[in-house]
Amino acid sequence: MITNVNTPRLTPLYWQGDALLPLERMEPFDETASGTLTILHTNDLHSSVDARTQFGGLARIASTIETERAVEPTLVVDGGDSVFGGGTWWCAVDAGATSRLLAAAGYDLAAIGNHDLERGPRSLRELITAGRRLVSTNLQFADEDLQQAIAPAYIVELEGLRIGMLGLTTTMTVRLVPRSVLAGVTFLDARASVLRAASALSPLVHSIVILSHLGFKTEDFSDTDLIPSIKSSKVAAILGGHSHEALSPAPVIDGIVVCNAGAHGVNVNRLTLTRSALGSISVQARLLPQDETVPESAKFLAVRGDELARLQPLRDERVVLPTLPGADRQLQLLVAAVRASGKATVGAIAMIGRLYMLNPLPDADSVSHLEVMTAYPNAEQLMEISIDGGRLKELIRNLSGVNFFLGAAPVLLATGDDVVAEDLEESRTYNVVMSELSAEGGLGWTALQDLDVKARPLAVTCADLVWSYLSSPVPA
């Protein structure tokens, strides 16, 4: 387990019946203790190891952490979605590289976001490499190793001051990750989980902070929905994520300070929680912009170089990128790769969502293996389903209303031509190639939820298909 310099003590707690018990021995609780805990908080980094704009970058965040810890003991936490998402190549292989870099930057504890579960329990095992600690109050795991590694609560202790830490994951995850991938992960009711944990924690701590990946205000159960249930508890602050707002100033709702630092590391939220000698709790929060005035940490950059060297073979492996018809090169290349693989029915229609083609191909005559993995980042396997023309028409017409990642353009696999809904025969059965998640009605493809869809796995990801196609002797 990593122990960061000048970090308050962190002790995991586990359920024994209705009691939360510390895994390690702790001194008797001093109810009269006072003091101040400083917390640095980010959320929704999405593997933004390198700055995406003039703001952000883990090297700056690491420098901010070093500066704070040079002055006083500081806890560094993340509100979830530290990995995956679009716009970065650091997660092309898995979450391990980003996880190790976050540990090197000085992070102590993190909630689990929906993107942190993109590969299910496998993702979580990657995230806890290098000793990273995760806290999850509303998730249960079938895997015994994950049960032991991911605690439902932590106690942060600094000179007698004790703060409880809880972690929440949005239930929206079940619409963003396939059921097969989430096998072994059970979502508990967020409100009930927090109330139970806060009740069990209260006799052990002076105050409670929640690391929340519910979102500030979302269509699912959110932080603002949770607050009425906990306003009379010891919860003093929610360090949020998921909805990407940069909340400045941090709103105070029913006495609870609600924070969100914004996405991609453009800000670090600095929170101080103080307990006076009289027992009152005060919380102050402000955003620290990670701009060009923040120097990059030399120590972190050295570790980044080591991680980059691990990925270098994938950067060096290059193949010719063929000339492709039409403006949508990424889709046309994927369609050509599916067709050439022989895995799908020749007369099928490809309807693969934009979530699976997040990052652009290079404007060059060659492409590296890493660039292909980045351009087609999702680890889901493709499926082929059979659907009648009437239902398929409805699905295509409703694509504009799909909330996530702009739906998908239906394309004939045999020719690469666009499919027009009005040209489909309602009485005919069509084969459609799509993602596993879309086939089960996730990502807003709700029209498929009520159908008894028989899906045939193609047992391959988009990236694997495209790379196999490009690296074959003579691409079709």
Image (spheres, rainbow, N blue to C red):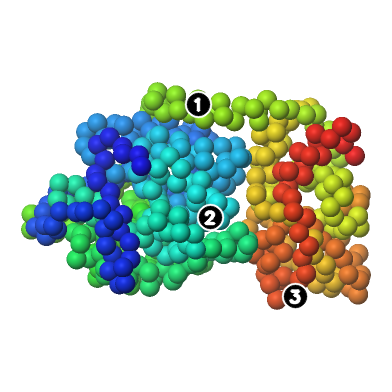
Q: Is 442 placed left or right of 258 in the picture?
A: right
Give me the C-alpha separation between circle 3 and circle 2: 28 Å
Residue 400 place in picture, x, y as percent: 71, 61
Q: Where's the N terminus, which quadrant?
A: top left
Of helix, strand and loop, which one carries label 1?
helix
Residue beneath disc 3: 452
Is residue 179 depicted above or below 267 in this figure? below
Determine which residue is flagged by label 2: 121
Q: Position of residue 438 (x, y in %)?
A: 70, 62
Q: CA distance from mark 3 to mark 1?
A: 49 Å
Residue tagged 1: 306
The residue nearer to you, when weighing 363 against 129, is 129
- Give the mark nearest the N terminus, 3 or 2: 2
Nearer-the-camera pick, 324 or 374: 374
> Residue 144 placed where, x, y %?
46, 59
Q: State how many labels appear.
A: 3
